[in-house]
Image (spheres, coloured by chain):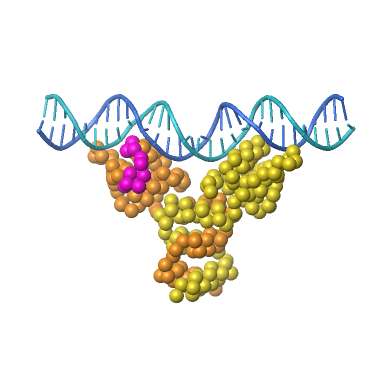
Chain colours: A yellow, B orange, C cyan, D blue
Amino acid sequence: MLKPTEAELEILHVLWQQGSCTVRFVHETLHAQKDVGYTTTLKLMQIMAEKGLVRRNVESRTHVYEAAINETEAQGELLRGFLHTAFRGSAMKLVMQALGNHKTSREELDEIRKFIENMEGDNQ
Amino acid sequence: MLKPTEAELEILHVLWQQGSCTVRFVHETLHAQKDVGYTTTLKLMQIMAEKGLVRRNVESRTHVYEAAINETEAQGELLRGFLHTAFRGSAMKLVMQALGNHKTSREELDEIRKFIENMEGDNQ
DNA sequence: CACCATCTACGAATATTTTCGTATTTCCCT
DNA sequence: AGGGAAATACGAAAATATTCGTAGATGGTG
């Protein structure tokens, strides 16, 4: 699976959240946060279709796109790369930083702790 | 602080690990893993000096470089960006993926669990 | 002292990613 | 049917990142 670029990821997030959408919809969504032209979004989505990152339905004049890669899997791939380039592979260091620097709610911490306890249980 | 590129990060990792070194040393280290020319490494390090990512001592003919940014801080910055672009800010999701997909030893899991328990303790 | 290995400086080629202008087609509304 | 809004296709500019060739300086060694 080809690694999506940063701009492509923004588009994928819209598709993951919305399911299928038109270029127009994706563009409106991005445009709400960022100043970008319509044809820029269109071009990116066309490139993504070539790369196999998205699928498109061209039956109607207005094409309908959907993500061709799974969100969790893609994030896993990205994480693997990032872990390597930024943390030289130390998952523990990354996790500690993530927990330490970003506000995580009590509930989320609980959930993570249970997750770990569960892993430790399996492991014995 | 300017965000280092991927190639720059590789150099920073050498500097973080080694302390001060020459271009030659950094190059040899990178070259062991990757086919890259000496002047490429040199040029990158010169650019990094301009950007303020590294400091260099030019007293002797052979310049000596050291990282100008702290490893943990830099990783924190990178993580913030990555968390946003890849996980839309969900630290929990990232942590779960990191723990789930990458082999983490029993000892490391313990350490993380204690870290969380400690955070939860403070929080009450 | 002259040569050679090694260093830095610098500009430019290449590759990658992002942006957008323009042309053309299609559909809808009057 | 005619005109305009909205869509896609396409190429190329712009921005960013990476690579390296070449020139010139410097220092050690025979």
Residue occupying image coordinates x 41% and y 44%: B7
Q: Quadrant of the C terminus of chain A?
A: bottom left
On the question of residue A14 being in view, the answer is no
B21 sits left or right of D7 in the view: left
Number of marks in the rendered image = 0
Q: Position of residue A16 (x, y in %)?
A: 64, 53
Q: Residue at x 58, y 48 (%)?
A: A9
The answer to whether residue B47 is visible is yes
> Does the magenta portion include B54?
no
Place residue B58 in its image quadrant: top left
Residue B34 belongs to magenta span: yes
- Describe residue A102's horizontal placement relative to residue B52 as left or right: right
Where A92 sits versus A41, above or below? below
Residue nearest the observer in this picture, A56 or A4: A56
Residue B117: x percent and y percent? 49, 72
Q: Is residue B120 above or below residue A27?
A: below
Instruction: Pinpoint residue A80: horizontal percent, then vertical percent.
Output: 48, 55
Camera-nearest residue between D11 and A9: D11
Residue A2 to residue B109: above or below: above
Q: Nearer the viewer, residue B81 or B57?
A: B81
Q: Residue at x 32, y 46 (%)?
A: B32
In percent of the image, x 54 and y 44: which residue is there?
A5
Does the magenta stretch mainly form a helix, a strand or a loop? helix
Extent of the magenta region: B29-39
Report x, y in % for residue B116: 49, 69
